[in-house]
Image: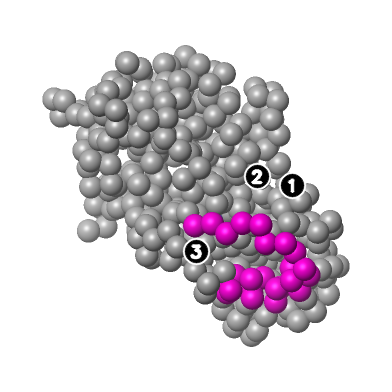
């Protein structure tokens, strides 16, 4: 089978790219034997460029904010295309801290917010508890970030798949064995059943597995293990996202729809180790219960491990590389959900028109070469 574009990987990023490419009239084939294996299956769905902002990652912050800005229209367009609601929640985020070191870290982050003109407000513990009454009385301070929202990541992936199909994309659920090259360029992918899908462009959107596909050039993408918990949310327990530093340890609590609470997440350099560990679950629950004691009463419905695609600077790999015909849309690390709209749009523009839009420039592989 021949297409204009083969997208290797049908997670949030792959499906965003496929949808936008198909909307441009390109013949698109997406290959993924099981998209539930991707990081999107575990993602809490935080759209949190401000809360996740870090010194030295200003370029990533710009991309993340550009993507967040697109979210309301992205979600509305998906609803129009599919009739599916993806649970965009706009109640904002509170960051809270417990001891003097946590408060120092919160104050430093807040100073960074102010320096960059980001929307954030320092709150007293009482003010934080008036917004989220289930928070413990033991917290020492908080920062409110009204613009950091959340979305139901699984529903988003399903809606994107639906929209991509409706726009004309073909979905193939056979495993991918290798990237196929000929004459120094990528020309398609070979599948586990021995067939080859050929295409003018191959988009690599395999998340944490991007560097392991035979035939792909060396890529600095590694798996970063995340353990995450899903609980049944009691009515009214939390309105928005709460992120906490609990004596130096990070935990987040994200209400989803009106009936689920996500608690996450570990960040472990353990390769593709799939084990849910007693220690991982214990630490997440212990810290979450310190932040919101009412979590003790909730039913634990799911524990899960998935792998973030990490890169050396925590930013994604977007655009062409040395191998002609291969376009990178990977390495989104902690921000795959947030960056899906801007990635889909930018990669589709690149494939259709040959130019990567300004918003997505500067995320190529060459940035690592510049440094060495
Ligand atoms: N974006 C949250 C996480 O990766 O845990």
Cβ atoms under marks 1 and 2 closer than 8 Å: yes
Q: Nearer the viewer, residue 281 or 346?
A: 281
- Any atom of ligand 1 within 8 Å of the CB at mark 3? no
Where residue 340 appears, x then y in whole percent? Answer: 52, 39
Cβ atoms under marks 1 and 3 closer than 8 Å: no
Neighbor class of circle 3 (other Cα within 10 Å; few <14, some 14-19, many 20+) is some
Q: How is the image coloured?
A: one colour
Where residue 277 appears, x then y in whole percent? Answer: 49, 69
Location of residue 157 by image quarter: top right
Where residue 332 appears, x then y in whole percent? Answer: 45, 48
Question: What stretch of residues is rendered in magenta?
Answer: 282-305
Q: Tell me the residue at 60%/42% (across/down).
A: 154
**Disc with the residue nearer the chain's start (1 vs 2):** 2
In the picture, measured across the screen, residue 9 lies left or right of residue 245, that is left
Instruction: Judge depth for marks 3 and 2 and give the one in front.
Output: 3
Neighbor class of circle 2 (other Cα within 10 Å; few <14, some 14-19, many 20+) is many
Q: Which residue is mark 2?
A: 152
In the picture, measured across the screen, residue 352 lies left or right of residue 160, that is left
Q: Is residue 147 in view from this perspective?
A: no
Question: In the rendered structure, does residue 140 fall within the stretch colored magenta?
Answer: no
Q: Tell me the residue at 66%/57% (across/down).
A: 301
Q: Which residue is mark 1?
A: 257
Q: Tell me the residue at 47%/54% (across/down).
A: 306
- Name the residue at the bottom extreme: 100
Q: CA distance from mark 1 to mark 2?
A: 7 Å
Q: CA distance from mark 1 to mark 3?
A: 25 Å
Q: Which residue is mark 3?
A: 276
Q: Nearer the viewer, residue 274 or 151?
A: 274
Q: Is residue 275 in view from this perspective?
A: yes
């Amino acid at each position: 089978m021949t297409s204009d574009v083969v997208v290797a990987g049908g997670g949030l990023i792959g499906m965003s790219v496929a949808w936008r490419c198909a909307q441009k009239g390109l013949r698109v084939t997406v290959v993924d034997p099981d998209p539930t294996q991707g990081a999107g299956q575990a993602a809490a769905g935080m759209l949190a460029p401000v809360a996740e902002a870090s010194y030295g990652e200003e370029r990533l912050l710009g991309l993340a904010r550009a993507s967040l800005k697109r979210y309301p229209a992205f979600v509305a367009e998906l609803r129009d295309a599919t009739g599916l609601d993806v649970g965009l929640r706009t109640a904002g985020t509170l960051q809270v801290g417990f001891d003097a070191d946590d408060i120092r870290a919160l104050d430093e982050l807040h100073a960074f917010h102010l320096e960059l003109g980001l929307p954030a407000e320092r709150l007293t513990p009482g003010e934080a508890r008036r917004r989220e009454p289930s928070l413990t009385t033991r917290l020492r301070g908080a920062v409110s970030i009204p613009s950091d929202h959340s979305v139901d990541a699984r529903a988003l992936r399903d809606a994107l798949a639906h929209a991509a199909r409706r726009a004309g994309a073909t979905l193939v659920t056979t495993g991918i064995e290798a990237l196929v090259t000929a004459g120094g360029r990528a020309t398609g992918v070979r599948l586990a059943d021995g067939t080859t899908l050929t295409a003018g462009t191959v988009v690599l959107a395999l998340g944490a597995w991007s560097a392991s596909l035979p035939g792909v050039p060396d890529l600095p993408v590694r798996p970063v293990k995340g353990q995450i918990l899903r609980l049944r949310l009691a009515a009214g327990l939390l309105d928005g996202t709460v992120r906490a530093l609990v004596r130096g340890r990070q935990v987040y609590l994200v209400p989803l729809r009106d009936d689920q609470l996500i608690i996450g997440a570990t960040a472990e350099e353990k390769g593709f180790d799939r084990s849910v560990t007693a220690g991982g679950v214990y630490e997440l629950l212990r810290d979450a219960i310190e932040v919101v004691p009412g979590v003790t009463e909730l039913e634990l419905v799911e524990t899960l491990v998935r792998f973030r695609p990490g890169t050396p600077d925590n930013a994604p790999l977007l655009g062409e590389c040395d191998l002609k015909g291969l376009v990178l849309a990977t390495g989104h690390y902690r921000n795959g959900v947030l960056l899906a709209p801007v990635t889909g749009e930018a990669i589709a523009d690149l494939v259709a028109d040959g130019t990567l839009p300004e918003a997505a420039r500067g995320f190529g592989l060459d940035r690592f070469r510049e440094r060495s």
